[in-house]
Image (cartoon, rainbow, N blue to C red):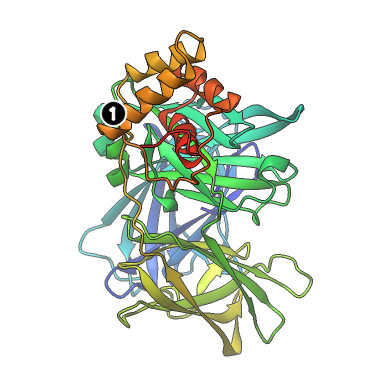
Amino acid sequence: MFPADFTPQKYSDVNLKLRFFDTQSNVNVENVSYRVQIFYGESLVANQMFFDRDGELVVKIQPKSNCTQEDLWKCTKYYGDVDAVVPNALTSTPSSIPVISGPVFTQSGQYTVKTDIIGAKNPKTQTSQDIRFETIIIIPNEQEFKISSSGIDYQVFAKNFQGPLTNFQFDDSSKSISFEMPFDWEHVAHVDFVKNYFEIPKNFLPLENVVSFDGKANGIQLFPIDLHYDKYSDKDSNILHFMIHNDELKKFKNSDSTLKVVITPESNSSIISKDLFFDNGIKAIASYDSRYSESKNILFTIAFFDSKGELSNSIRYGYGIKDPTGKDIVNTGGNLSLLGIELPNGIDSQVLNTPMPGKYSMQIVLLGMGQNTYDRPMFQKFDFELGSDVKKIESLEIPTWIKNNAGWWADGKIDDSSFVQGIQFLIKEKIMNIPSTQSSGNGSDEIPSWIKNNAKWWADGKIDDSSFVQGIQFLVKAGIINP
């Protein structure tokens, strides 16, 4: 779908793209006859035949609410050029995009798109039997939250795909965003992913210079690719994308049917950006996350700008990667008649497979604009390196009774020395696991007041385990605790 963050409150229409291709060669199957049905729950809302020559069917959806018919599909209208060969089919071409107008994508929730391939290669050739594909499209629910910093209130819009978010907070001291979302762990096997978008105002000063985040879900470290901070797509907001796929999601299971998430800016960003300049005046900013993780994937983003510094619409590009072993990975799209990955808004994000740490080489090629192909492709090349430190996904092991000690210390029932000695004993005996921290060796005995505040908030359940551990790490680094 384009735009990918579509909601009926924000946009008047959305393009739905269906691609029929050979998964082994990544090449489109041409001259395809489609039957497309769209359901909202069990209710049919659209049903139409289409014909497309290049295997990439694009349909514009115009959501129209206020349908009074019991059968919603009766309110749906179809517009476009009728194909000369395939009966009752609308033709999809770059110059003539068919339209579905009606009660489609008008409400948040789950829609099912059922696509039957009636014929392929030749519009008159029927397949021996219809080939059916189904996909789920979730229209997000939009929530509005207010967060405060330095006495100023800001509005943050959240788009959630699974259920309403609760306990949304911003911590001014750590600049962290936290929230909770309901999750039924009994059905985790049937959930492909959970995701949310957060639209953060560009004038929100605490995150003004932030480009990357760390995150934890139920106290366990997230993969770097789960968080993507998009500062280009919207002129008024920076968009924080949060997405966890099923394989990783299973690691966060707990007993209270919730997913508790804390997202904190990286103190030293791992995002590396490269400026690329092409002969026709186009500039690209290519960025990648240099953190190599157990997911063996990294997030790569690229944004193309014209000579005036505006995002360049309808660019077509491709890329090639050579990994540390010399293996080549190439992506120039799957449409043989129109090579390239098409970017309607000039921005692309790709999850790249990175099987090992080390030095990679990447080449970007500009192929054209819209339907126009350049006389000669334009190339730019750069190298990037992924760190060798694999981030381990592990839970902080903090027994619950330690919270009692922290609360007593914060309330003045035990003194600083007793608290420090207790923490030292727990670390030494490996009852409490603290990530390794290099001591500065200052050896001061004074504990900052914010550490005591953290202990109180942690004991009261107002901050998570990782925030408390950060305080303990500070005490180790300052030499107040000697593990």
Q: Residue furthest bottom?
A: 376
The residue positioned farthest toward the left in the image shown: 128
The amino acid beneath tag 1 is Trp
Is 129 drawn above or below residue 328 in the view shown?
above
Number of marks drawn:
1
Could you tell me which secondary element the residue under label 1 belongs to? helix
Name the one closer to the observer, 436 or 212: 436
Furthest-top residue in this view: 413
Above-or-below relation of 386 to 421? below
- The residue located at (39%, 49%) in the rendering is 223
| Quarter of image, res 81 | bottom right
Say whether residue 416 is visible: yes
370 on left or right of 463: right
Q: Position of residue 420 (x, y in %)?
A: 42, 25
Front residue (pair 18, 163): 163
Tell me residue 5's x, y (percent): 56, 46
Report the side of 77 relative to 352 (left or right): right
Q: Is 58 placed left or right of 305 in the picture?
A: left
| Residue under the point 28% across and 22% down | 255
Residue 326 in the image: x percent, y percent?
32, 83
The answer, for residue 53, to whether it is visible in the render is: no
Q: Quadrant of residue 406?
A: top left
Q: Residues within 10 Å of mark 1 (few under 14, many from 20)?
A: some
* Residue under pointer 1: 185
User: Which residue is pictured at 48% across the width and 48% down the height?
Assistant: 227
- The front one of 45 and 365 is 365
Q: Does 349 appear above or below 413?
A: below
